[in-house]
Image (cartoon, rainbow, N blue to C red):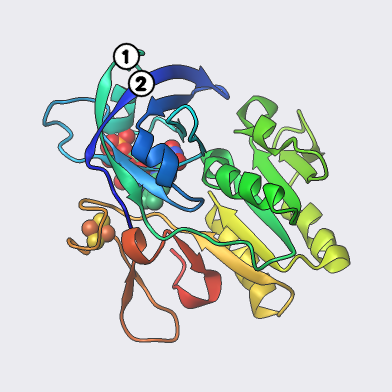
């Protein structure tokens, strides 16, 4: 794994999708080396509070421009500070971190995502699309405006389904109502999920029934990001011991981890 513990320069900072931060950052090493499934630790400031960088999935890269993109849901002190980052600012960043996902062995896959969980799979979807893999995207949110990263999934040939809790776009209800018959008809070889515990359990049930192979993007409280502090341990399922989300993940076969 090649990491670059340096800084990144803010290229663009926009509030999108009804309150999410979309950050474009310049750091050549990360833009060149990051792969789907990997993340960075980013601090939106140079002070000591909060002291640690926060983990964010790499939503996409542009190696030619030396840029990469993050989509961030403001939740607490660290992410609130990121709202006001202006272009040209240098911020501490470490990455790429984590184990990359290789989808090239699959001929077909689906992703089931909600909220900012969508940002975890955009890079994977683009790479899989470039490989000619058949893809179906199931994206949900409480309302249409919050269908995060929706334009990333509007790719030719991709089956794209949306659902909203208030019915303002797509299916009015639970998006797993759409995934279930899709799996029955098309039998995608893998389903990746992020952003919802309920989705993780649903994908686990599909996997357990042998209907597809399920994979889950897990989160964990992170300090070091490289396997030293053990702050991000998750229990193995049907085996002794723990995985470290930062080193062994953040993407795991759903059958191998105890779901949160
Ligand atoms: C590998 C990985 C990738 C991630 N990718 C993204 C991403 O692409 N976009 C995004 O918006 N978020 C992502 N997250 C979550 C993000 O890192 C946290 O929301 C962020 O660290 C919160 O920092 P904060 O200082 O704003 O909030 P804090 O003040 O640290 O926390 C605010 C609240 O959120 C809870 N919280 C904080 N971190 C986590 C966590 N990891 N798991 C569960 N609860 C938590 C705290 O308990 C607290 O209640 C990712 C997390 C991991 C581990
Ligand atoms: S964050 Fe330190 S071991 Fe994972």
Instruction: Give the vertical position of 79 relative to 118 (above or below).
Output: above
Residue 150, given in percent of the width and then of the height, sits at 67, 33
For disc 2, the marked residue is 10
Which quadrant holds the C terminus? bottom left
Residue plotted at (41% across, 60% down)? 99
For disc 1, the marked residue is 88
Along the line of sight, the residue nearer the viewer: 88 or 212: 88
Relative to 47, is 186 on the left or the right? right
| Quarter of the image where one finds residue 185 | bottom right
Report crowding for label 2: few under 14, some 14 to 19, many 20 or more residues within 10 A (C-alpha).
many
Whether residue 231 is visible, yes or no, is no
Relative to 12, is 1 on the left or the right? left
Do labels 2 and 1 touch, CB within 8 Å? yes
Residue plotted at (48% across, 77% down)? 256
Residue plotted at (28% across, 17% down)? 89
Relative to 127, is 109 on the left or the right? right
Q: Which mark is residue 55?
A: none
Instruction: Give the vertical position of 91 relative to 250 (above or below).
Output: above
> Element under label 2?
strand
Along the line of sight, the residue nearer the viewer: 54 or 87: 87
Whether residue 71 is visible, yes or no, is yes
Report crowding for label 1: few under 14, some 14 to 19, many 20 or more residues within 10 A (C-alpha).
few
In space, the residues marked 2 and 1 are separated at their CA atoms by 5 Å
User: Within 8 Å of ligand 1, the CB of disc 2?
Assistant: no
Residue 211, given in percent of the width and then of the height, sits at 74, 75
Extreme residue in the left direction: 48
């Amino acid at each position: 794994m090649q990491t670059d513990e340096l800084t990144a320069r803010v290229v663009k900072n926009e509030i999108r999708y009804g309150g999410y931060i979309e950050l474009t950052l310049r750091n050549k090493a990360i833009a060149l080396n990051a792969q789907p499934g990997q993340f960075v630790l980013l601090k939106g400031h140079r002070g000591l509070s909060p002291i640690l960088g926060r983990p964010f999935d790499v939503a996409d890269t542009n190696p030619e421009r030396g840029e990469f993109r993050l989509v961030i849901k403001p939740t607490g002190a660290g992410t609130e500070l990121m709202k006001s980052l202006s272009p040209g600012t240098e911020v501490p960043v470490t990455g790429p971190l984590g184990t990359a996902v290789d989808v090239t062995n699959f001929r077909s896959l689906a992703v089931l995502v909600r909220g900012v969980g969508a940002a975890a799979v955009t890079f994977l979807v683009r790479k899989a699309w470039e490989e000619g893999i058949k893809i179906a995207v199931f994206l949900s949110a409480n309302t249409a405006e919050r269908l995060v990263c929706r334009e990333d999934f509007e790719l030719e040939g991709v089956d794209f389904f949306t659902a909203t809790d208030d019915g303002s776009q797509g299916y009015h209800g639970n998006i797993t109502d759409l995934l279930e018959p899709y799996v029955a008809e098309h039998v995608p070889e893998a389903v990746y999920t992020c952003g919802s515990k309920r989705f993780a359990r649903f994908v686990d049930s599909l996997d357990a029934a042998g209907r597809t192979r399920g994979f889950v993007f897990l989160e964990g409280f992170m300090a070091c990001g490289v396997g030293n502090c053990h702050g991000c341990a998750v229990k193995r399922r049907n085996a002794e011991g723990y995985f470290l989300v930062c080193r062994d993940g953040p993407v795991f076969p759903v059958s191998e981890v105890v779901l949160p």
